[in-house]
Image (tube, helix red, strand yellow):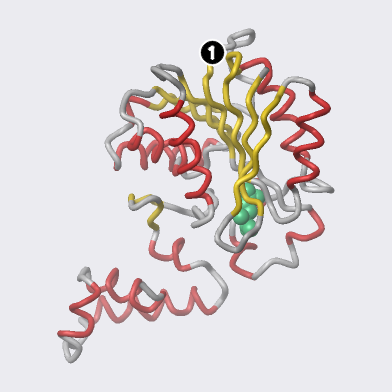
Amino acid sequence: MTESELLFTHALDCKRESLYLDKDRPLTSSQSSFVSSALKRRLSGEPLQYILGSTEFMGLEFKVNRHVLIPRFETEILVDAAIKYARSLLSFKGRILELGTGSGCIAISLAKFLPDLKITATDISIEALRVALDNARLNGVSNRICFTASDLFDSLAVNTRRYSICISNPPYVPTAQIDRLQPEVRHEPRGALDGGRDGLGFYRRIIKGASDYLIDEGILIMEIGFNQRDGVEAILRSSNSFKAIEAIKDFNNIDRVIVARRG
Ligand code: GLN
């Protein structure tokens, strides 16, 4: 749907077709004041998803607010790949660890599509974890995900090499580039975007920690930004803990996901 279709289906609580089939229907005064205040916010650069308070990801509904990054279409590639790997690990019974869950869209989609799995999902932001928990309830998987306040691995139990998959879409935008992004992005939490000077800060920490938390042959799978493949692969190689590194491209032919196997 276009942004105007999304706005009006939301305001009128109707399906897209009715906007066109019933197009002479006048707005009630509360609908019209909702639309005009939404338009003012949108014109000031606020993303429509925050104004409407929800968005779609992997065909599921997710609540969003300014405490969480808005799920991106490209991140579905990360989730699809993780589902494929989880299913290919023979008699997969392990746990998945997600770092930096934000709205919870990755952990919740995995819980939906991999019904036998238990997931631990961390975030440093309590406000984000509140949104993620609401979304897990909304999608009926809150009993399968353990949400934990943690700066990456910092608050997880130590010496527990028990995760079969570690997944993350960490902040990866180089600090200096954030203010050059489109104005909508500046409404999103900086902590979910800022990957430090070269954008690779979180990959260094995740790769170091993941070797302590993954089982042998466990999979580390991460979203990466434009032109970051070589940098992230170099960090993986120099860790000496990962092999079989693979990159997956997005629909614009940009390397978007990196997969490595512990061992
Ligand atoms: N994909 C987001 C963007 O391009 C960045 C998300 C992230 O840093 N993980 O704005």
The residue at the point 66 percent across, 23 percent down is: 210
Taking 191 as reference, is 39 above or below it?
Answer: below
* Residue 238 shown left or right of residue 154 in the figure: right
- Most distant residue in the top direction: 159
Query: Residue 208 location in percent, x, y?
Result: 74, 24
* Residue 232 shown left or right of residue 26 in the figure: right
The residue at the point 59 percent across, 42 percent down is: 169
User: Of 34 and 6, which appears nearest the observer?
Assistant: 6
How many labels were placed on the picture?
1
Taking 204 as reference, is 139 above or below it?
Answer: below
Query: Residue 91 location in percent, x, y?
Result: 39, 17
- Most distant residue in the bottom direction: 24
Q: Amino acid at mark 1?
A: Arg
Give the quarter of the figure containing the C terminus: top right
The residue at the point 45 percent across, 43 percent down is: 80
Res 228 seen here: yes
Query: Residue 107 location in percent, x, y?
Result: 45, 36
Q: Quadrant of ligand 1?
A: bottom right
User: Of 186 and 84, which appears nearest the observer?
Assistant: 84
Taking 63 as reference, is 92 above or below it?
Answer: above
Res 189 seen here: no
Query: Residue 136 location in percent, x, y?
Result: 35, 37
Residue that mark 1 sits on: 162
Quadrant housing residue 25: bottom left
User: Of 73 and 141, which appears nearest the observer?
Assistant: 73
